[in-house]
Amino acid sequence: MPYCLAEGADALADPPWGAAPPPWAPGRREDIGRMRENHHDDADRTWCLSEVDIFCDLSEPEMAAIAEAAPMKTYTAGEILYSPPQMSEVLFILKRGRIRIFRVSAEGRALTTAIINPGTIFGEMVLLGQRMYGNYAEALDDVTVCVMSRDDVHRLLLSDPRIAARITAILGRRLGDLEQRLSDTVFKSVAQRVACTLITLIPAQAPSRTLRPLASHPQVTLTHEQVAALAGTSRETVTKVLRELADRGLLRLGRGRITVLDPDRLRDEGG
């Protein structure tokens, strides 16, 4: 059952988890006042879009036109970028950081449906077939996004066949990722889901081979409770699984930080 917001924003006033919400309950760390809209020069605005996949071969004037229509905003880790009561059509273009898309049941249990990485899009935009369907979007890290309205999406994105084709491809991959995540939830053990979650969160540039003891290992900067929310299980279970993986030399555990010592073996653990 999706988290019921039929009553609008009032539904969050008396949530099912009571006075002590879990760390990743919707809105717990939301602070709209901390969201910052960046007012910089043209170079900064273009920077926000310059490495986004769908704009990879645009000319400088084309990039400048899109940057002008897509103000750059930043959010800190834990902030909610989008929640169901907003009911507004807006497209986010993710430049930096990662976003967690999740739903919440009537009992307060969260289900992660996607993890959005830099260089792609998300949000509520019927024109693109891009819907949030009652999902929340939360910053996993400090993030930078560019935000576009419905009119600007139609004028600047859908009118360009190159961009429209790439958006279609992104949405197709997103659907495939969702199907895989749901399949993992049903068919994989908790230990496998935890391993898959950690592999997903490793930075893309991290080496996949076993590294020398003094080399820099890829790190996942999340707490056990946050990993549990992503893997769809309890903190206690995640702690047990992580300790077992650490005892076998795959991980090193720290406060709010998990160092992946052997990504290949961890990937094998995820099945």
Image: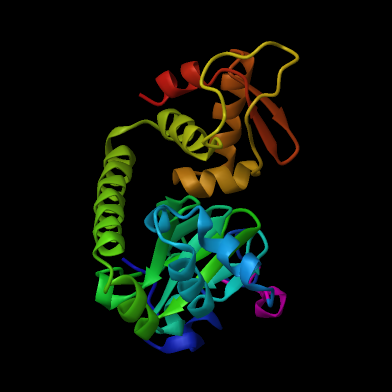
| Vertical comparison of 242 with 167: above or below | above
| Vertical comparison of 99 with 14: above or below | above
**From this viewpoint, is residue 25 visible?**
no
**Of the pair 41 and 234, the residue shown nearer to us:** 41
Q: Is residue 40 left or right of residue 151?
A: right
- Kindly identify the residue that appears in the image at 33 percent across and 71 percent down: 157
Q: Is residue 33 magenta?
A: yes
- Kindly identify the residue that appears in the image at 59 percent across and 38 percent down: 236
Q: How many marks?
A: 0
Q: Quadrant of residue 131?
A: bottom left
Q: Quadrant of the N terminus?
A: bottom left
Residue 233 place in picture, x, y as percent: 47, 44
Q: Quadrant of residue 186?
A: top left
**Highlighted magenta segment, given as a residue range:** 26-38
**Of the pair 47 and 79, the residue shown nearer to us:** 47
**Of the pair 30 and 166, the residue shown nearer to us:** 166
- Kindly identify the residue that appears in the image at 59 percent across and 28 percent down: 242
| Vertical comparison of 59 with 260: above or below | below
Q: Is residue 25 magenta?
A: no
Residue 129 place in picture, x, y as percent: 24, 69
Q: Is residue 234 left or right of residue 142?
A: left
Residue 54 place in picture, x, y as percent: 38, 57
Residue 209 place in picture, x, y as percent: 53, 15
Q: Quadrant of the C terminus?
A: top left
**From this viewpoint, is residue 254 visible?**
yes
Q: How is the image coloured?
A: rainbow
**Of the pair 254 and 107, the residue shown nearer to us:** 254
What kind of secondary structure does the magenta stretch mostly adopt?
A: loop
